[in-house]
């Protein structure tokens, strides 16, 4: 779970990916994440 604060267009692209059996994406979707700590 999380909150989208920027880049909603990326979420929409993932949402629109073609799916196969069990509603899984036909192609793997990978995400890279960076965290900054104070």
Image: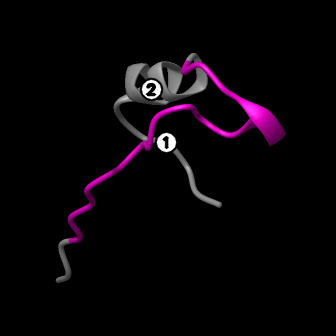
Give the x, y percent position of residue 33.
27, 60
Asked whether the residues under the numbered discs 2 and 1 touch, taking CB atoms below 8 Å apart as contact, a structural biologist would say yes
Closer-to-camera residue (38/21): 21
Q: Secondary structure at mark 2?
A: helix
Q: Residue at x 82, y 41 (%)?
A: 22
Q: Secondary structure at mark 1?
A: loop
Closer-to-camera residue (19/33): 19
Q: Which residue corresponds to mark 1?
A: 4
Q: Is residue 31 left or right of residue 22?
A: left
Q: Is residue 33 left or right of residue 6?
A: left
Q: Which residue corresponds to mark 2?
A: 8
Give the x, y percent position of residue 17.
54, 21
Disc 2 to disc 1, C-alpha distance? 7 Å
Closer-to-camera residue (33/19): 19
* Within-10-Å neighbours for mark 2: few <14, some 14–19, many 20+: few
Name the residue furthest front.
Answer: 21
Q: Quadrant of residue 28?
A: top left
Q: Main secondary structure of the magenta part?
A: loop
Q: Quadrant of residue 19?
A: top right
Q: Give the quadrant of the C terminus.
A: bottom left
Q: Is 24 covered by the magenta stretch?
A: yes
Give the x, y percent position of residue 11.
49, 30
Q: Which residues are magenta?
A: 17-35
Q: Residue at x 68, y 40 (%)?
A: 24
Q: Residue at x 18, y 72 (%)?
A: 36
């Amino acid at each position: 779970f999380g909150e989208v604060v920027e880049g909603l267009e990326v979420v929409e692209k993932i949402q629109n990916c073609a799916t196969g059996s069990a509603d899984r994406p036909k192609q793997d979707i990978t995400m890279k994440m960076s965290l900054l700590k104070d």
